[in-house]
Image (spheres, grey):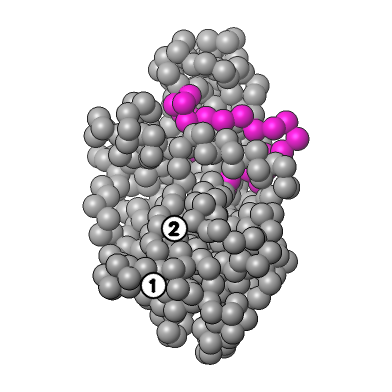
Amino acid sequence: MNGHTNTNGTHLPSTQKAAQFDPKTKSVQINNVPIPSIKPHEILVKVHAASLCHSDLMLFEPNEQGLTLGEDGPFTMGHEACGTVVSTGSEVKGFKPGEKIGWLPIVDCCFDCEECGIHNLYCERGTSKVQGMTVDGYFQQYCAIAWRNAVHIPDDMDLDCCAPLFCAGCTAFNAVTDTIFELKGEPSTTWIAVIGCGGLGTASSSIVEAIHTNEPSSGHLGIQYLKAYGYKIVGVDLNPQALKEAVNSGADHVFNPKTDTDYITQIRSITGKGCHAAINFTNSVQAYASTPDLLRMNGVLMVTGIPQKPLQFQAMDLSMTRFRLRGSNNGTTPRLEKCIEFSHKHGIKPHVTQFSLEEFPKMVELMEKGTQTGRLGVLFK
């Protein structure tokens, strides 16, 4: 028999196509794979859209973060997606077939320990895995997810462009809200720098020899969130198109270190004594090393992008509170709910260029070249 009937009576095919990473060859393949069966704590989702994140490229590159990416055989890539509920396991609460949902990618965690309250990747069990990075992810039409990772998407939100909100979006939103938590002034007189506005590029300058955004569009989304909160924004990026989008999103001033060689002096002049905070979305060590020069005394440097190599800061700068160092990430489900609510209320949308699944290798190639702005995604229709 071709296909099988799901627990709620929905007839599904037996197999599907998936974009997979082969750890042995470090290559991408489009393979036929089974439709997953769900466990009691899981939801079977029909994926509507999935998007490619720059951190997906870590699969192809060595890293110094202690991450083990991939297990024995090929697995399906993708850790940000959205879709509709097909069926639910016996332990699932609050979700039913047909509902629109998005979700976070950490599985095999308990969700209840102290560590999970901060980030599920560090669950005290020590068994956490990342869908799309170590086990099957979402570049396939049907996937199984942990129900406690999921949140509802309002009916009037467009699923075509929602997928990036479930990594890039919540990362940017949490970076913005964590930064705001550290600040005391009125938004209308408080300056925040966004380093990495959504594009990629290379240069040799005081702030970067290479800016590669960890989340290509996190910076773009971060500007939208900051604008919605009413803050003054300075954008820094090497990609002219990304800076144009930053202006369209509400940035008050933008600078390209390639052409604005005195941009640090200009930014300090515009903001008075420097920015009150800077959110770095890049994975450039050089960008991080020079970001403190943009800050006034006791400014906040928010670490969001993750370079492959360790960052270094002067202990005296931190002990004397020349600047404060904070970190932010994609967070937990309660924070994801707030991100979706805020994005819906303020009409914040990612910019996504869509492809077919068969074009997935082309998407990876484009991201590796770093010539695109916004997100690259696949629509399953």
Provide the residue designation for mark 2: 304
- Residue 315: image location, x then y, percent: 26, 70
The residue positioned farthest toward the right in the image shown = 156
**Residue closer to the observer: 90 or 251:** 251
Q: Marks 2 and 1, Cα distance to the nearest angstrom? A: 20 Å
Q: Residues within 10 Å of mark 2 (few under 14, many from 20)?
A: many
Q: Is residue 296 above or below residue 163?
A: below
Q: Which residues are magenta?
A: 138-165
Q: Is residue 229 left or right of residue 260?
A: right
Of the 4 image quadrants, the one containing the C terminus is: top right
Does the segment drawn in magenta span residue 243?
Answer: no
Does the segment drawn in magenta span residue 156?
Answer: yes
Provide the residue designation for mark 1: 322
Which residue type does callout 1 highlight?
Answer: Arg
Foreground tag (2 vs 1): 1
Which residue type does callout 2 highlight?
Answer: Thr
| Residue at horizontal 27 percent and vertical 40 percent from the top | 71
